Amino acid sequence: YFDSRVILGANTLNNPLPDGGGKIAQGGPYCSNVPRTFLNENTCQISRDDDACSARRYRYDSSSAIPVPLTEATIRRLHELSGRYIYVITGLPVDQSHSPCTPERESRWLDTEKSQDNCPNTPGINAATIETLEGKLRYSSWGTKKIKRTWFTYDDGECDVDNAKTIGMQIFADDKCWKHVHPDLYDVYEMDYWTRPNTHPGNAAAALAGNPHPIKKWWDIS
């Protein structure tokens, strides 16, 4: 029996399908990429195709997910293995952020590594707001040792969302000195799309001026 709706693609050990069928499956259950095993380890390849999909067990089954700490060494290794341009985002101004008292919004906090004696709470913020945010930081398990994330709700207590001093504030909580930072600070992004010639006018302008590519240069020059 032949079904004309079936799209066949060569996908052998020696000639694997570059995207695993991702362009057709769109990341769904018919992705033909598989995990590396003893059966294919000698011919297993990393896919660099933009449409590449992943094996279903890793995409949908959280029980088989493996956490990968995105340290500087890990990010460098990912770049070396994949050739992708992967960056940690820094330098985001907190004054373009929102108050940590804003309901239903994530806030991010950075451990400044200051002692309690050198970490006075930001002045001009009422005691109830300080107490509420101390509690949010104390009981938050969302983040890393260096970064904590909090999520404020209407039921969390008094918090002065209209006080601009809460943006970028400093507070001592959970035995650490925390500074409110931009909610996207230290996020990690794969930036290959922005390395293409026509995805941003700055790319073409840099090429015409004989300057390094504004996205690629941070890896290529180093």
Image: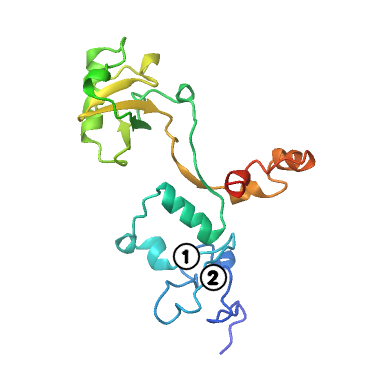
For residue 23, what is the image quadrant? bottom right
Describe residue 198's horizontal placement relative to residue 170 as left or right: right
Residue 20, numbered label: 2
Describe residue 201's horizontal placement relative to residue 131 as left or right: right
Residue 168, numbered label: none
Q: Residue furthest top?
A: 124
Residue 136 placed where, x, y %?
25, 30
Describe residue 162's horizontal placement relative to residue 137 as left or right: right
Q: For mark 1, what is the residue?
A: 54
Compared to residue 91, the image places residue 72 above or below, namely below
Q: Amino acid at mark 2?
A: Gly
Q: Quadrant of the N terminus?
A: bottom right
Task: Check the image and tell me how it is coloured.
Answer: rainbow
Q: Residue at x 42, y 51 (%)?
A: 73
Q: Residue furthest bottom?
A: 1
Under circle 2, the secondary element is loop
Q: Residue at x 75, y 38 (%)?
A: 205
Residue 206 placed where, x, y %?
73, 39
Contact check, label 1 and label 2, Cβ < 8 Å: yes
Q: Residue at x 42, y 71 (%)?
A: 35
- In the rendered structure, which disc, 1 or 2, sits on the residue that comes first in sequence? 2
